[in-house]
Amino acid sequence: MRRLLVLSSAVPVFVAALTVASPSSFAAGAVYVGSCHPGAKATIQSAVNAASSGSTVVVCPGTYHEQVTIGTNLTMKASGTVTIQPTAAAQTATDENTGEPVDAIVTVTPGNRVTLRGLTIDGSQIESAVNGCSENLVGVLYQASAGHDTSGVLRSSTVENVTPTNSGCGAGLGVMVQAGTNPSARATVALVGNTVSGYGKNGITCDDVNVVCRVTGNTITTSPTALVAQNGIQVGFGSYGKVAGNTVSGNDWTAYGSDTNPQPQSD
């Protein structure tokens, strides 16, 4: 039996006038995105691709219409109000357990250590384009694989609007941390002080043996639905960690009254 712990209840478009910082305020060795730094990259993905291991990517204020895949050790932080809001959805990973395609807005690939801070990650422009019965929509994906440990921190960020069509098939996750079934795959992620809202199935999902999550100080909310039983925070299938100080609301499966086999402990 699989044991499960559930807690329920691209091109940037700049949208505001920007002030270019003085050279003395620039972070030494950082890769910049946008218009707040001379020589900055035009897209977040191009900055990530140019970043060396251990460096920092600083994202200037604006809205960036792209998905981002991170395949190196780095820190990505917002300098002001930054929204990552793709307008087209593409597969960025494969679910380690189901083999299902995953369309993630931000993907951390196996074997990397990544900190994300101060970002808004918004799926509102691609929700309707993702069919939840054949693929999954995920805001932020941290994924490990055999021999490729993954770790990181998601802090002070917003993940919103990740309810695909046919979310009743169990799709639509704000944040997912997974490592599959191989015992040599390990993922350790801290999720601290974030806001997660508008998800189809789960707000924060930590699955698989050797997945360790610290979930603290987050606000997690969604809207009642008759399509699927939602979970604000799911720590299950062998994963473990700490869950404390979170506010979780809105996880209400409204079809409970018509269920032919009601199970209050899970419904």
Image: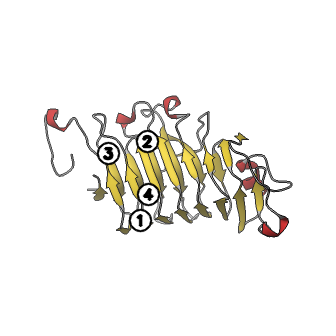
**Residue in the picture at 77% in, 68% down:** 27
**Residue in the picture at 26% in, 43% down:** 252
Read off the residue under disc 4. 181
Q: Are marks 4 and 2 in contact (CB under 8 Å)?
A: no
What type is the residue that disc 2 sits on?
A: Gly
Q: Position of residue 213 (x, y in %)?
A: 43, 65
Determine the CA span between mark 4 and mark 2. Answer: 22 Å
Q: Residues within 10 Å of mark 2 (few under 14, many from 20)?
A: many
Element marked by disc 4: loop
Of circles 3 and 1, the one toward us is 1
Of circles 4 and 2, the one toward us is 2
Label located before the other in sequence (4 or 2)? 2
Read off the residue under disc 1. 217
Read off the residue under disc 2. 172
Of circles 1 and 2, the one toward us is 1
Decide which of 9, 16 is in the foreground and name it: 16
Q: Position of residue 219 (x, y in %)?
A: 40, 57
Q: Residues within 10 Å of mark 1 (few under 14, many from 20)?
A: some
Read off the residue under disc 3. 230
